[in-house]
Image (cartoon, helix red, strand yellow):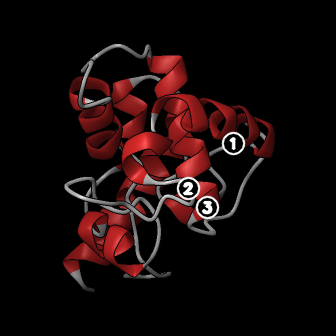
Amino acid sequence: MNYRIAWLAGAAALALVQGQAPASVRDGIYSVEQARRGESLYRQECASCHGEKLEGGGQAPPLTGDEFVMDWNGMTVGDLFEKMQTSMPADKPGHLDREQNAMLLAYILNSNKFPSGNADLPVDAGQLRLIRFESAPGK
């Protein structure tokens, strides 16, 4: 058995046993309502640098599309969340609280066509580190 597959299976089983978040961004880890709240917050806090359509610009990278997804492929949602938490917005790092960053991340995931679920994306770092960012199923 491939070690990566074994690790993902183990992480998924652990998450289910512990009642924690699913193991992949493809498991519906945010709610549509949370993404909607994130969209309005994105317009206020992020669009001036990352663009109205998350396309990036200047030194701000895109937050949607193949380049974005491949940059985070194989990492965890916790990695992305903590980067947002500690370094964004660029002119006021740490200005947004964990709940606001969870809304923004839900919007980003939704914009990248990752499926939604019934519950909001958690703000707990431990839970977020269990969720793998995958560019495609099984990758």
* Marked residue nearer the N-terminal end (1 or 3): 1
Which amino acid type is shown beneath numbered disc 1? Ala
Residue 36 image point, x, y percent = 75, 40
| Residue 111 marker | 3
Which amino acid type is shown beneath numbered disc 2? Leu
Q: Residues within 10 Å of mark 3 (few under 14, many from 20)?
A: some
The residue sitting at 49% across, 44% down in the picture is 47
Q: Nearer the viewer, residue 40 or 112?
A: 40
Is residue 21 at least partly visible in the picture? no
Above or below 80: residue 2: below
- Cα separation, mark 3 vs mark 2, equals 5 Å
C-beta proximity under 8 Å, tags 2 and 1? yes
Residue 20 image point, x, y percent = 53, 35
**Is residue 7 shown left or right of residue 14?**
left
Residue that label 2 marks:
109
Residue 28 image point, x, y percent = 66, 55
Q: Quadrant of residue 43?
A: top right
The residue sitting at 53% across, 22% down in the picture is 100
